[in-house]
Image (cartoon, rainbow, N blue to C red):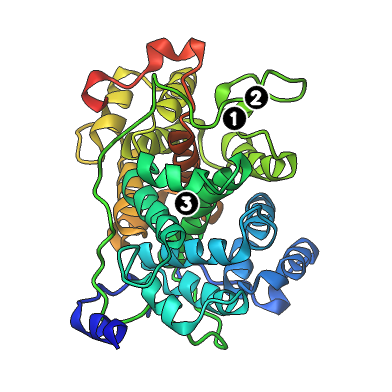
Amino acid sequence: MKLVVLLVAATYLAPTFVTAAPRIAPLASAELDDEQRALTTRFAALGMRSAVATYARYPALADAMLPYTEFLLTKSTLPARDRELLWLRTAWLARSDYVWAQRVPAARRVGLNNAEIARVALGPDAPGWKPFDAALIRAADELRVDAFVSDATWAVLAARYDANQLTDLVYGVGEIEMHATFASTLRIEIEPELKDRLPSGVAYAPATRQANARLVGKTARIEPLPAAQGVPNANVFRTFARNPPADDLRNRVGRHIRDETSLAPRNREQLIMRVGVLCRSEYEWAAHSRIGRQVGLDDADVARVIAGPSSPGGNALETALLRAADELYRDDAIGDATWDALAKELSQNQLLDALFTFGGFRSATYAINSAGVQLDANMSEFRFPQSLR
């Protein structure tokens, strides 16, 4: 009874773009070529028919993204009940009816009852959670707000989880959040047989505040493995190489964004660097501000990335990309004006790559920050400017 009272008493902020027509329509069955049909058939078991049929418009992106999604949803090292709690809370925080509708049936299948599912929206401090369940939900909140799992929450999780499970948790929250931002930005329609929606009457109130706590210059929480043949020597790769099957799938995401994207190199790096600023990830900033210089960014360009889309200079596309990053970070969707500005300059594949770049690297910052990945020796001259530390 207390749960019902809480649900009715609060005010819910409605998710964005739940009724408008899709910005990029999913492929109908008759439109599929052989490659696209193979993708939609392979990933049909995920249940995300509308999303998969949208991603399949760009097969290279779908082939990079969906194998890791499949792993996270069905094969990760996390216990099934734990991961569904995390994915539900992530959907709630991202205000994604699409992801919520997908995950509720899965949550019921692994034993979560309707009262627990409704309680997810109330957050980790709602009465009724066991301490570990509350820590799981709080971790999702901390990642969403601060791109970092706090010391107290990490200690609770690390008492039960090993390094692979902790990695699947932090990366997984980011990847599920990425699907939420795709769904909200592209206005992907919920499959008609799915009836669950975000609980109404619940205030949007993450259970944490931005603290910008970081482990740079301190002790790593997950120590990098010793240098090994076949593993790049950078700390970020050696930190997350413990589970090769999962690492291979994560690296497919990274390879597409870094090496196979349809975005121009300077635009790719501007987006990644802005993610580093927004998520206060000094490692990502150091790695990609160096690459940014290599692809032609100068001091003024770097200063604009730090200052954000309201800063003077830059062309219309670059300003729109920075604004898109800020909107995705703040609102979990790109607004109409920004989308229209991007659509004037970018192809359909480039629009999808922009979303993938932001989401993939936001997920990476969650893992890098929370694991305490330390800067590599060659990063000293590319550290955050003092204003961001």
Is residue 108 visible in this depiction of the protein? yes
Q: Amino acid at mark 1?
A: Thr
Question: Total number of numbered labels?
Answer: 3
* Quarter assignment of residue 17: bottom left
In the picture shown, does residue 258 fall above or below 323? above
- Give yes or no for contact between labels 2 and 1 (Cβ–Cβ under 8 Å): yes
Q: Is residue 19 left or right of residue 26?
A: left
Query: To which residue does mark 3 refer?
Result: 355
Position of 79 compared to 2: left or right? right
Query: Between residues 238 and 270, which one lies in front from this camera angle?
Result: 238
Q: Quadrant of the C terminus?
A: top left
Q: Position of residue 127 (x, y in %)?
A: 32, 71
Which marked residue is nearer to the observer: mark 1 or mark 3? 1
Does residue 160 sit above or below 32 in this rendering? above
Is disc 3 placed on a helix, strand or loop? helix
Q: Secondary structure at mark 2?
A: loop
**10 Å crowding of disc 1: few (<14), some (14-19), many (20+):** many
Spatial CA span between label 1 and label 3: 26 Å
The percent position of residue 7, horizontal first and vertical second, equals 27, 81
Circle nearer the N terminus (2, 1): 2
- The residue under label 1 is 239
Type of the residue with mark 3: Leu
> Label 2, on which residue?
225
Q: Which of the two labelled residues, at mark 2 and mark 3, occupies the earlier sequence position? A: 2
